[in-house]
Amino acid sequence: MGNRRVSRGQGGGRGARTRRPYLAQVRAALEAGLVAWLREKGSIDAQGFNELSGLSRRWAIGYLEWFDARKVTLRVGEKWKLRGG
């Protein structure tokens, strides 16, 4: 028993199901805040998103890259801009 490790994708029980709606809400709120900022200011860097979101730099950059993959933002050098805007 003791230390049991569950690798990603296994044991999807309650934990995985209950976190998803919350995670979707958090991502939607982060996206809405980021889009509003970018419409007003034009661009943001990792430190700016860190301050806007309250996330650590590590998580801020991860989310900015996730927004790039979803085609919400476009990275230009060390800044992110709203894609198509």
Image: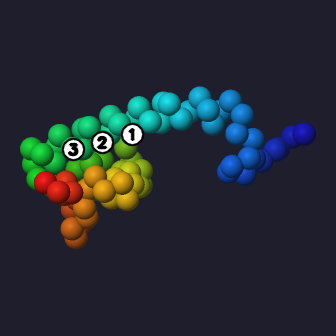
Residue found 32% across the figure and 34% down from its top: 29
Residue located beneath label 2 in the image: 31
What type is the residue that disc 3 sits on? Val
Tell me residue 51's x, y (percent): 26, 44
**Rendered-image quadrant of the N terminus:** top right
The mark found on residue 39 in the picture is none
User: How many other residues sit within 10 Å of disc 1, few (<14), some (14-19) or many (≥20)?
Assistant: some
Mark 3 or mark 1: whose residue is earlier in sequence? 1
Which element type, helix, strand or loop, lies under badge 3?
helix
Quadrant of the rendered image containing residue 46:
bottom left
Asked if residue 61 can be seen in this view, the reply is no
Which element type, helix, strand or loop, lies under badge 1?
helix
Tell me residue 19's x, y (percent): 56, 33
Tell me residue 40's x, y (percent): 9, 44
**Rendered-image quadrant of the C terminus:** bottom left
Residue located beneath label 3 in the image: 35
Residue located beneath label 1 in the image: 27
Which element type, helix, strand or loop, lies under badge 2?
helix
Residue found 27% across the figure and 48% down from its top: 49
Circles 1 and 2: CB atoms closer than 8 Å: yes
Circles 3 and 1: CB atoms closer than 8 Å: no
User: How many other residues sit within 10 Å of disc 3, few (<14), some (14-19) or many (≥20)?
Assistant: some
Left or right relative to 41: residue 61 = right
Instruction: Report, in whole angstroms, how far the alpha carbon at label 1 lies from the one at label 2.
Output: 6 Å
